[in-house]
Amino acid sequence: MSKIILQAQGLEKTHHQGDETLTIFKDLSLSVSSGEIVALVGQSGAGKSTLLQMVGLLDKPSAGKIFIKGRDVSKLDDQGRTLLRRKEIGFVYQFHFLQPEFSAVENVMIPQFIAGKSEDDAWDQAEGLLVRLGLGQRFDHRPARLSGGEQQRVAIARALANSPSLIIADEPTGNLDPKTSEEVFNLLIEQARFFGTGALIATHNMELARKMDRILVLEGGVLKAA
């Protein structure tokens, strides 16, 4: 049986505006297993990005618990959350956020350096990932010399660089044309399946969502299966 990588129980997120309390969602639960690709869909403003930030340990829920590989991480301090993110979670965003002054291979090496890897090990991992993503001839190219699709492939390699257990992706192909979007999306799914990485991917594209293992719909503060 696949191991549960991410489990969220009874999540709640509220914002206070003066005397009013705005509830984005309440009593929300979900899980993602190793090698499982889960789509998260919903209208703009439904709270998809907020949910991803919480399960990715970038933001804290107002209530509820989050487990990563069976460990309750809800009460971790900022340093503990940072260390866990560095080891267990890879992020891919709509905009690639590559460092413009560094080459493709260097961008994939940076998170490995932060995690304490040696230069040789970081290079080997970056090289292998970029080759797998069809960028074997682009190692020394800086982002400005790469197409949008190529930049996003570098971002996927960077997300996978430290062999995370979970990928969190927020509209990872939303800034690309339809053909490139499908190509990059297929590569992301292919790599997640190859490495046995669980993935929670927010998207507006239902055609892409239907290629995933499950679809979760966030609507009116409620999360339900499609």
Image (cartoon, grey):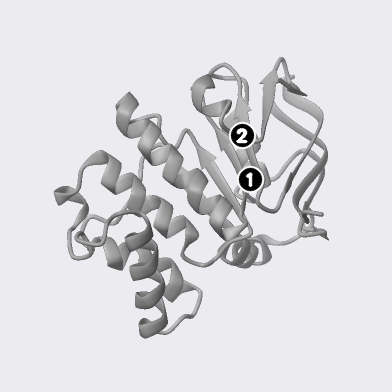
Position of the N terminus by quadrant:
bottom right
Badge 1 marks a residue whose secondary structure is: loop
In this picture, residue 42 sits left or right of residue 118:
right
Is disc 1 in contact with disc 2, using a CB cutoff of under 8 Å?
Answer: yes
Q: Position of residue 110 (x, y in %)?
A: 38, 68
Q: Earlier in the sequence, mark 1 or mark 2?
A: 2
Q: Residue at x 57, y 46 (%)?
A: 168
Q: Residue at x 21, y 52 (%)?
A: 143
Amino acid type at circle 1 is Asp
Residue 56 vertical position relative to residue 45 in the rendered view, above or below: below
Q: Residues within 10 Å of mark 1 (few under 14, many from 20)?
A: some
Given residues 54 and 226, the one toward you in this image is: 226
Q: Quadrant of residue 211?
A: top right
Badge 2 marks a residue whose secondary structure is: helix
The answer, for residue 16, to whether it is visible in the render is no
Position of the C terminus by quadrant:
top right
Q: How many marks?
A: 2
Q: Residue at x 47, y 33 (%)?
A: 171
Residue 3 vertical position relative to residue 37 in the rendered view, above or below: below
Q: Which residue is mark 2?
A: 50
In this picture, residue 124 sits left or right of residue 3:
left
Q: Which mark is residue 59?
A: 1
Residue 2 vertical position relative to residue 140 in the rendered view, above or below: above
Q: Residue at x 33, y 69 (%)?
A: 127
Q: Quadrant of residue 152?
A: top left
Residue 59 vertical position relative to residue 110 in the rendered view, above or below: above
Q: Residues within 10 Å of mark 2 (few under 14, many from 20)?
A: some
Q: Quadrant of residue 79?
A: bottom right
Q: Position of residue 62 (x, y in %)?
A: 77, 38
Q: Position of residue 156 (x, y in %)?
A: 42, 51
Structural distance between the alpha carbons of marks 1 and 2: 8 Å
Taking the view exactly as shown, the residue that stands out farthest to the left is: 145
